[in-house]
Structure formats: C-alpha cells, structure tokens
Amino acid sequence: MTMFELNAQIWRDMAEIADSEPLMRQLAKYLKKLVAKKEDPTLMTKEEFFRRVDEAKEQARQGKVHRIETKEELNQFMNSL
C-alpha cells in the first residue's frame, strides 16, 4: 500500500465514524497517544540505545566529561541546563 492509498483509506475510515461522537472521542484520545509516542525523544531502538552508550563511553575515554564532585557543583550544573 502506497502512502497515498494509506492516506485515502484513513480518510475513508474516519468518514465512517464521523457521525458517532463516542467513536470520535475515542479516536481523538488514541491520536493524542500516537502523537505523544512519535514525539517522545526517549523512545529508541535497542541498536540506537547501545550506539549512544558506545558514543558516551568514547567521549568519557577522550575526557569529554563534566566532573562534579560537590553538591554545589551539582546544583550549579543543574541550574545551567
């Protein structure tokens, strides 16, 4: 199914439920969940997660880290974010 066909199918399906308020409310609720899922930056594949871990390890090995040794330094760093 092409993107155009998928888009057309979605609109046809929405037209079928457009006259039912309960179904439209259910659809709106589900769509909000889908959009939130899409925008969640913490969602990633297993491969992406381990790639990011490997990148962080390499940065640490190269000394590209923030050293925080006191509570005051931690507060200062957190406030800078």
Image: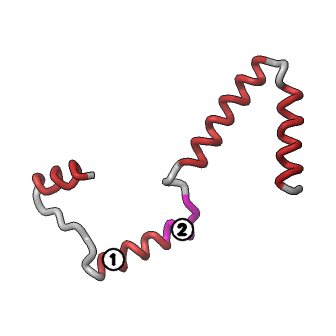
Magenta region's main secondary structure?
helix
Dot 2 falls on a residue whose secondary structure is helix
Q: Give the amino acid at mark 1.
A: Gln
Rendered-image quadrant of the N terminus: bottom right
Above/below status of 10 relative to 73: above
* Residue 53 percent location from the top left of the image: 43, 71
* Residue 14 percent location from the top left of the image: 83, 32
Mark 2 nearby-residue class (10 Å; few <14, some 14–19, many ≥20): few
Which residue is the site of mark 1? 59
Tell me which residue sits at (83%, 45%) in the image. Answer: 7
Residue 8 located within the stretch drawn in magenta: no
Above/below status of 12 relative to 54: above
Q: Is residue 42 left or right of residue 68?
A: right
Dot 1 falls on a residue whose secondary structure is helix
Above/below status of 29 relative to 2: above
Which range is magenta?
44-50
Residue 48 located within the stretch drawn in magenta: yes
Q: Quadrant of residue 33?
A: top right
Counting labels gives 2
Calculate the distance from the C-alpha at mark 1 to the C-alpha at mark 2.
Answer: 16 Å
**Residue closer to the observer: 68 or 35:** 35
Tell me which residue sits at (83%, 24%) in the image. Answer: 18
* Residue 32 percent location from the top left of the image: 62, 35
